[in-house]
Amino acid sequence: MKSAIRIGALALLAAFLLPAVGVSAAQPAPDDPAQAPLVSNLSDDASLSPDYAAYAENATAPAGETSVSVDLNGASAAQGLTAAATDEGLHLQGTGSVRFGFDVPAAASFQLQLTCRIVGELDPEYSLLLDETLPFAEARALILPQYWTDDGVRFDADGNEFSSAARPDETFYDRFAADDTGVYSEPYAFSLTAGHHTLTLSFTDVDLTLSALTFLPVRQAPAYADLARTYAERGYQKATGAPLSLQGEDAVLKTDRSLPARSDTESPNVSPHDFVRSRVNYIGGGDWNSPGESLSWELDVPSDGLYALGLRFKQDQLINGYSYRRLTIDGALPFAEAANLRFFYKSGWQTALLGEGEEPYYFYLTAGRHLLTLSVTLGETAAFYGELKQLAAEIGDLYLNIVMITGESPDANRDYDLFNQIPGFNDFLSDYRDRLNALAEAAEALSGKRTGQYVGALKNMARVLSSMLKNPYLAQDYVSDYYTQYTNLSSWVYEMKSMPLAIDELRLGGEAETLKPEQAGFFRALTFTLRRFLASFSGDYNSAGSISDADVTLKIWVNWGLDQTRALAQQIEESFVPYAQQTLGKKVGVKLQITAATLINGLLSGDQPDLALSMPRTDPLNYAMRGALCDLSTFSDCAAVLDRFQPGADLPYRYGNGLYALPDTQSFYLLYYRSDILESLGLSVPETWEDFLHATAVIQRNNMQAYLPVSALTNNAGLGACGIYASLLMQDGIPVYNADKTACLLDSSDAIATFTRWTEMFTQYKIPTTNTNQSFYTRFRVGLCPLGIDLYTQYTVLQTAAPEIKDRWGIALLPGTRGADGKINRTASGAGTGCGILEKSAHKQEAWAFLKWWTSADAQLAYNNALESVLG
């Protein structure tokens, strides 16, 4: 799911930056009724459709008795994507829709199961229509999760273990049309009448094969007490023999690549552990926390019988709260209580038996292989989350109405009479206060009357609203406190969905007393701590990589963390070493050294590396002027290597007639806008700077602000306020240097005019030069800054951490300058880092081979994926 967000952001950016590419597909004849065009515009349908809660409340169909299989060969239309019958099923590829017909024997409620094999690394997105109608709003955006697996642990040169990179498991699995936000733990239930129906699935950039589409009857899992009576009636006995032990890190399937197995080096309770080296010994923790994410372990059950489940886990992040998991065996929920298993807070590792009180839960398992799955769910807090999300949005809307009248800093000498200027003002305050107090009471009851940060945030917001109600003529005096508590409340909309849990070991057996993993006693724990302390003096924490039998060993300095360095070292061993062997005919090793020293220190000491990665944009020229870097243009295939970059990406690293670095990162700006606020103000998304300034004026008249970057440096790539000025220069077609590159032209009349135009955005249009000590993210999320320009990476932050404004904001290209021909030039300046070869290196050919490998698309993607797999 995290992968989908990350890659989805890149896909959106690619949609802006790349020309449209058409997918060839046979188009049905327009006069053929059976091949009528599919519904493709879902936005209007979604706005008119109820949400799932309302849909489910109004559904009257009973639970079905039999399954209904959809005939894949009866697809009556395919629009925009290829749909080809294969031996495995129906292969769908591209972006578009496909329609199926099916018959329901009797009115009933069903869950839709899609048995499919997904190719690639994306979680396909799709929408679902029944009888050409969106059944409920959530059906507009559904997810089919890709499953991932890995190849176990890997070792670095020092014998430390770490998780291998995950790879997609492209085999057939059953997936359901389900909620991916965590509000509903069960798959969606569709209410169908008797008779013929159509099912339309619309996919975005998909490559999958459907082997079956099945509407399964909705089944309610029995309560455990009822199931236990059934066990007794059937004479089931507890399993005998030694318990089955499963290590958490041995999970065979996961729904996200960023669920790596990890190493806990601080506790003797985890297994395995080592005093000197890191050992992969658990999975989960902060990585395994989003609703819908699951981990699966394979069981090899020796005999039929009743099995209980014990485990060692750690839940040390949700203070005075529970982390919830849903347990399924072979895809089925064994009993109702397994849908909301609770893991309470405690520092350190815990052992527990799944059960109610002192009585463990028992599962009946037959001899053979089974798949045990634990999935993240919101459990009993799901209702709280849905209510809080809606409440936070309403409180935010009221805050904007207040600020549009008072501004962020109300005049203490002015009477605003908010209860007169905002219709229903006091009613809103009273309603929000009562709902907040009710949520706080319910949350306290759930946690056993323990007051945590979540309850505190609810009560503080309710306190502010109560104060405004008690002092209606002074309500504006609480605007600042209202803002503070509202931002805290909004943060909890995101935090509530976080359900971290770490798993070290699972044990299954018939005798409950043998299923709790052993915990280290005091003296064993003390011995472990002392031995770890002594071993810390001899460990090498500043390097990774190298091959003992290498013909040549390159030395590279990096200012990264140890985990990032080890991930690159592993990739070098798996990918670069074979690449160098093939292209150079020799075995090239790489020694990565973690250091904060600059290249200058290495050059002065004579101990410089062969290569430098991630150099700030200005460094290559500074070093090139002093003869410290190698001219890469002297390599015969340099021009071919440059073809892999965007035109002009190499210009910042050219000096004279030479090229002294290749780009390894790039950064640029995008326009962010709150569509709900712009619409309420009658504004459209700005296309030119004139549009941007006009929108800014309207926004400011309503006591809000627009945002432009103003700091000198906003990130390590060096893209700050000067990025906007540079963009304006390029849009105006004004050169920065003369034709010979011997003089700067920023003092020309044209450049000064553009500079004046840029500065007047701050001086005449009063765009603030500081963001009042709040980040653009925070103010954009709240609505105080509904229009602004920031780095493209802000997209993922907002998409992930601001769920309460989902579907209320968007991104666009940087505003542009309209030319004499009427066309808008929307060029955006960029920034980035570079990688180069030291002139004193004795292995320039080998270093050049490394740069070619490192800057290739495959290596960059593999490293990014490895980081997400290993670091989360």
Image (cartoon, rainbow, N blue to C red):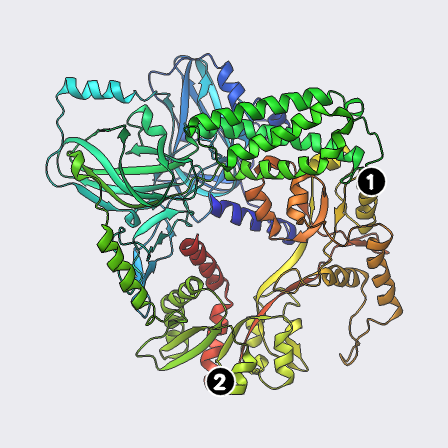
Q: Is residue 372 left or right of residue 202?
A: left
Q: Is residue 43 above or below residue 778?
A: above
Q: Are marks 2 and 1 in contact (CB under 8 Å)?
A: no
Q: Say whether residue 553 is visible.
A: yes
Q: Earlier in the sequence, mark 2 or mark 1?
A: 1
Q: Is residue 628 above or below residue 725?
A: below
Q: Is residue 159 left or right of residue 681?
A: left
Q: Amino acid at mark 2?
A: Ser
Q: Say whether residue 360 is visible.
A: no
- What percent of the width, then of the height, locates residue 484? 65, 39
Query: Residue at 44% across / 13% down in the picture?
Result: 61
The secondary element bearing badge 1 is classed as: helix
Q: Which residue is mark 2?
A: 841
* Picture quadrant where residue 664 is located: bottom right
The secondary element bearing badge 2 is classed as: loop
**How far apart, in angstroms, are the residues tagged by discs 2 and 1?**
59 Å
Point out which mark residue 698 bears: 1
Q: Is residue 50 above or below residue 779?
A: above
**Which is more toward the observer, 488 or 118?**
488
Query: Residue at 67% across / 55% down in the picture?
Result: 669
Q: Nearer the viewer, mark 2 or mark 1?
A: 1
Q: Amino acid at mark 1?
A: Val
Would you call the spot at circle 1 few (<14 residues within 10 Å), some (14-19), or many (20 or more)?
A: some
**Which is more toward the observer, 152 or 497?**
497
- What percent of the width, then of the height, locates residue 299? 22, 41
